[in-house]
Image (cartoon, rainbow, N blue to C red):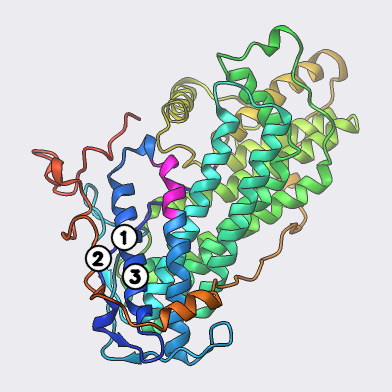
Amino acid sequence: MPYAFTLPTTSSLYYAEFFSSNTHPSLLSSATIYRAVLRNALKKHKRLPIQARDSDLSTILAAINDYLPYLHALDAGLSGSPVNGEEIDIVLVKEVEPEWRASLAAAIPGREAPRIKGKGIDYELCYVLTTLAYVYVSLSRVQLRTLYASQTPTADQRISAITAATKYFLQANSIHSYLSTRFSDDSFTSAAVDVSTSTQGALASLAMAEATLLAVLKDDSYPAAVAQERNKDDKDWMIKAPDIPKVRAKLFTRLCLAASEHGGRAQAILASSSAARSKGVDEILIKYMGDLKRTSRAKACRFFAIDAELDGKTGEAIAWLLAGKKELGFSKANDEGSRLRGLAKLKKDWTERREDKKVEKGGVWGNDAGRLEEARVIEMLEKKWNKMNDMINTQIVPPSGPLSANMPSGRDIHSTMPYLPPSLDIDTLIRLRVPPERDETRVMSDDDNDSDHDPKYGGGLPGAFPSASMNDSVYY
């Protein structure tokens, strides 16, 4: 499932202190107002309980979309580019220094990462667009969560949710790809790991990997059948067994391998860039990318197994399932044909129940990149085919090592869409030519302090770490 990104917060900023404009004097005050709205929305979002943040994403998305045209207009005015055919004159008074909290940076446990001050409008634009990409990924999580609701979704609801999530992932990929080529690390401080070109390139590959896997999930009925079987509130099993039509196994195999390649590329970029920095990206994100790579390869092994079983090669199909379990890390090279026993099985069952609790309670779920879900599907098929092979076919199960060593290369189904920056329309540009009626450059949010925590809680819990928030805790 998609990674649960934390939306960054920012400090206050007044553009009239850093810029002046003779052609559009109201642009600076308008940009300051919309930035204050976004800052206030991000602070309120962070104070919400985890279960309530999904419904607040639309507010963040609207605030970013309202602010971006003005921010792009400032950027165009500084670079001398026209906006809708109109020249905007922006004079730099002094270098703007926005502060944003690096949400991906590795931090001391119990403490959040500090805000990082950057220089230039590029730093502000890069962080706002990165936040927009995080919002798109979070919206995709909201869509995919419906697949695991207490009421089993219909086929149309399932396809609609996956299609919407795929659209959000492709939009996030477009933004990250744009940022990885639009800016350079020379103008940013090394502590701002969120906006470095290497991080943006890795996040673009991660979003493409997720979108590729969703193309497979749309026609993959096995995860839905396993989820329906584990759903305690589902009663359809009384009427009929879940429908599992034939899948295009060879095509899905190549798509899963392409997703694995994207995930591996993202992990390698982040791991190498973090090693070169004194303060790198959080290890949880790097681990997630590795889990996504392994899950994608395990899915490819499963589709190889399905293709072999359709050809009547049950023994080879079981060998492919064993290869998938090795990719997931639930089977060792010398455990050919064995099952999890003792503490290993107990730990796996406990982890599965813990993940189910997270989904049920609306907590931070899915940080294993679907690894446990794919393990359930493989175990279901392995149990079924082992029984068939023991009773009817009696085919020899070959070693799985040579099979996984000869897997083909991947095949992409999506391409990166170009990011189109929003621009102000003609009517708005005309209104911005008029000087502001009052001093709007000192527009501030509802509270002027730079703390992200709710004042009524005093910023933390008694006896806890200074940054521990009462609203950020959730059982499991």
Residue occupied by mark 3? 192
* Residue 425 spot, x, y in % from top left: 55, 74
Looking at numbered disc 2 in the image, what kind of residue is underneath it?
Answer: Ser
Determine the CA span between mark 2 and mark 3.
15 Å
Residue at the image position 55 percent from the left and 26 percent from the top? 149
Q: Secondary structure at mark 3?
A: loop
Dot 1 and dot 2 residues touching (CB under 8 Å): yes
Residue occupied by mark 2? 11
Residue occupied by mark 1? 39
Residue 328 in sight here: yes
Pick whichever of labels 2 and 3 is earlier in the sequence.
2
Residue 271 in sight here: no
| Vertical placement of residue 243 versus 81, above or below | above
Q: What segment carries the magenta color?
A: 53-60
Looking at numbered disc 1 in the image, what kind of residue is underneath it?
Answer: Arg
* Residue 204 spot, x, y in % from top left: 56, 63
Determine the CA span between mark 1 and mark 2.
7 Å
* Residue 291 spot, x, y in % from top left: 53, 47
Is residue 54 covered in magenta?
yes
Which of the 4 image quadrants contains residue 102? bottom left
Residue at the image position 41 percent from the left and 44 percent from the top? 56
